[in-house]
Image (cartoon, coloured by chain):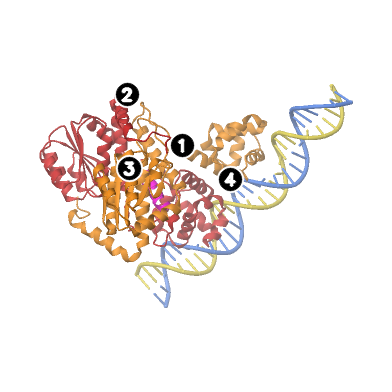
Chain colours: A orange, B red, C blue, D yellow
Amino acid sequence: MQSVNLLNVINDQLPTLNRSESKVAAVILADPEAATRSSIANLAKAAKVSEPSVNRFCKRFDSTGFPDFKLRLARSLASGIRFVNRNVDPGDDVTAYTAKIFDSTINSLALVRDRISHERVSQVVDKLVQAKRIYFFGLGASAAVARDAEHKFFRFNLPVSHHDDVLMQRMLAATGSAGDIFFIISYTGRTRELVEVALAARERGATVIALTAPDSPLAAACTLEFTVEVPENTDDYMPMSSRIVHLVMLDVLATGVTLRRGPEFLPHLERIKASLKPTRFPPGKQ
Amino acid sequence: MQSVNLLNVINDQLPTLNRSESKVAAVILADPEAATRSSIANLAKAAKVSEPSVNRFCKRFDSTGFPDFKLRLARSLASGIRFVNRNVDPGDDVTAYTAKIFDSTINSLALVRDRISHERVSQVVDKLVQAKRIYFFGLGASAAVARDAEHKFFRFNLPVSHHDDVLMQRMLAATGSAGDIFFIISYTGRTRELVEVALAARERGATVIALTAPDSPLAAACTLEFTVEVPENTDDYMPMSSRIVHLVMLDVLATGVTLRRGPEFLPHLERIKASLKPTRFPPGKQ
DNA sequence: CTATTTTTGTAATTTAATTACATTTAGCGA
DNA sequence: TCGCTAAATGTAATTAAATTACAAAAATAG
């Protein structure tokens, strides 16, 4: 993947270009957006060179021709504008920090999506399908993730619970057994309490799955690590996007389990949906 | 509508397309990347339609013609979104459903990002900064969101709590007063209990903010509606991405509050961070 | 079942891009 | 400085691509 921005490449090559090529480069760099919209004739006129010169320019940058060049230029522009991990700045106004937070979250998701181990997802789904009981453990921000996971897995009709109380976690781990799954969620994977809980549960022969950082003590302590590398947020103002990534990973697992259960499980899901109906105002009514 | 991903637009319009147009759409959605690289002749062949049909298809989506369409498609792709809004299929393998879930989440975030009312964000931040007390209420999936919000707003050094117990919610609302903020989170905005709670709190002179769907009973019942339109998930297999969107909206609000507090507030945040250190294994150690 | 409208394809046309080739320009040695 | 060579650039021809106009076919309504 020539992930390097095309505009940068042009800029770098600037000194090695001959006269008409640099004229073309100047016009493109001055307004790349406009360049993607114009024809070869227009661009040639703007740069005061002939059409074949523009064409040669494009080929110099490994394009098959002018249309291909425009396409690559468009791609570069779009990726540069939106998805940079721009940190929130104390001087930012609403528009700026809103966009930055959304963008950095989207960015984290896109990154993880491309790095996820599908084989590992499969393995974890296998374990979850076979479980007799599932406990979701998390502390701090991950407690909310564990809570969400419980709600999500509840519909599978098996005993599932979440715990954000260290004592409860310890007690459950100490009395765990084969067939139990302890699903531990931790962004850092360095929380002592959770590592100890993982070891205790493992000792008892239970399956311990950790949704956490790779190469962390927690990843080492569990029986099946399910790791994600989410870029760190060093910035004080920037919220952690790891929570969000973890939530989506759990969505993936829940979907995996549903699919594994097959279509005969759908009526059950429908029943859960229907049970909520009386709690709601009918749609359409204001 | 221009800023919205072109693939989404195609997907949305899918039901309104006629036979050959949907053939073209199918081919493009199946591999948009390839579409940007192919000529009109190739695409026509792949879709088993004539070249003018492809051309008409492009014009239907506000392009001046095929090359313009390809350009816009390339731009859309560069923004990190690949398969869009495609529902999970019972036959999908791990790779497929993982990508779909990530993409649809990313997609929801991108959509909301472009539609958010910055003025409203500002107003809500104002209210939050002035609050004497904040309650986050949610039920079901939104309970986890409320939990996360509590964790996030805790660091602002003001009394904040979350409640997923309807009775607690009622009691708190009934005893609320000016200076209290009841922040109610609900995807549908149609949960009777929450609407009643909102009305009760409002009666008492408290500020009621609802993070919910526009034109919903809950939005009507609160003092300040903070609405988001997240595309519905009709699919049984597809997880709800509204939770994720709500979480990110709360990230935005928390960031807004932090920025409003100014730099003299940073030491406080550092102190909270430092307080967690003893609970962790030092970095570097396995 | 026919008439009308919509959809789709064929063929012609136009437009855009590319290639081949000629001209110019610059560089360099005598 | 002249003349040669090679690189650079442009002109014109060619090719490829996209678009338009129009006709045929299909779908829909009466």
Q: CA distance from mark 2 to mark 1?
A: 28 Å
Between A252 and B21, the residue placed more toward the observer is A252
Could you tell me the amino acid type at mark 1? Ile
Residue drawn at (38%, 28%), measured in percent from left and top?
A: A89
Is A118 located above or below residue B262 in the figure?
below
Q: Where does label 1 land, which residue?
A: A81
Q: Position of residue A222 (x, y in %)?
A: 38, 47
Mark 4 vs 3, N-terminal side? 4
Callout 2 and callout 3 share a chain: no
Compute the Cα span from label 2 to label 3: 38 Å
What segment carries the magenta color?
B97-111
Q: Chain of mark 3?
A: A
Q: Secondary structure at mark 2?
A: helix
**What's the chain of the residue with tag 1?**
A
The x and y percentages for residue B108 are 36, 47
Q: Is residue B15 left or right of residue C17?
A: left
Is most of the magenta stretch helix, strand or loop? helix
Tell me which residue sits at (42%, 46%) in the image. Answer: B5
Type of the residue with mark 3: Glu
User: In screen coordinates, is B234 left or right of B196?
Assistant: right
Please name the residue that numbered disc 3 is placed on.
Answer: A196
